[in-house]
Amino acid sequence: MLYVYILIGIFGLACIITMIVASIIEAKKSRISKEIMKPDVLMDCEKKLGEFLESNKISRREDLLRLCQSLNVQIETVPPINRHLNGAEAVIDSSENGYIVRVAENLGVKQRRFAIAHEIGHVVMGDELPVKRNGHGIFIRSKDEQIRDYIAAAILLPRDKFSQLLAEKRFYSLGTKGKNEFIATVSEEFDVDESVVIKRIKECKLLAEIPS
Ligand SMILES: [Zn+2]
């Protein structure tokens, strides 16, 4: 019987430790997220992306694959244990006449597109290539990494195009069911995860609050 109590005790302790670690991670994530989710930070990212696309003579509404063609980004699918990936989902490096993105073959279509767009985000922000893998943790992403994530979402769901869609569908007047249907439809049409669509809605709402 004593063993049972000891086992229950160990299990209970493990649960408490897991909960403490999870709440620390969550607190850190939400703090970083608050740093990013500020209109001026988001506007700065939009400006940087806009200038980058303009300087490369690329439309702000360009599809990801055509954007890759315009920037001469070669995409190579590699096994997840590839030495270049070093545990990441994708990495970007300079090539002779452009860039090469190596992306893990085990990613789904939506994850793969986001990973490629994130890597292009590093180029947009002028990062030294190949990018050092600091801040790419699964649980905690640094502020810089979240900004590259923002750029990825802005490439996949361009602000003008997405805001226009939100207005056309009267998104903010929709009920919960209508909003969920909108999110699911955009996720399928644009090949992005629903979590990216939901975040993009919040970002576009924040950007719309900035007086022009
Ligand atoms: Zn990154």
Image (cartoon, rainbow, N blue to C red):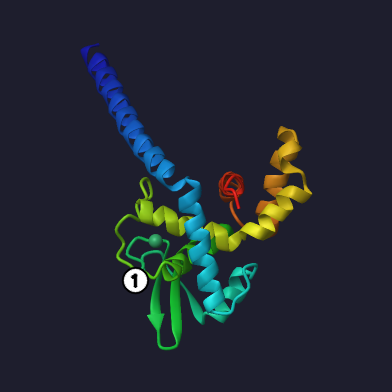
Question: Could you say where residue 192 lies in the image, as x and y percent from the top left?
Answer: 60, 56
Image x and y of residue 106, in percent: 48, 61
Task: Residue lying at the far top in this picture: please name it.
Answer: 1
In the picture, measured across the screen, residue 36 lies left or right of residue 177, that is left
Q: Quadrant of ligand 1?
A: bottom left
Residue 111: tell me if it is visible: no
Picture quadrant where residue 60 is located = bottom right
Vertical placement of residue 56 versus 203, above or below: below
The answer to whether residue 163 is visible is yes
Q: Amino acid at mark 1?
A: His
User: In the rendering, at what x and y percent does residue 65 appear?
Assistant: 60, 73
Q: Which residue is mark 1?
A: 84
Relative height, residue 108 to residue 100 (above, below):
above
Residue at 73%, 53% in the rendered image: 165
Residue farthest to the front, as pictured: 212
Q: Residue at x 31, y 62 (%)?
A: 133
User: Please, what secondary structure does the residue beneath circle 1 have?
Assistant: loop
Mark 1 nearby-residue class (10 Å; few <14, some 14–19, many ≥20):
some
Report the residue at 65% width, 67% height from top. 61
> In what quadrant of the picture does the N terminus appear?
top left
Side (left or right) of 92 relative to 20: right
Residue toward you, 10 or 103: 103
- Residue 209 in percent (x, y) is at 59, 44
Residue 153: which quarter of the image? bottom right
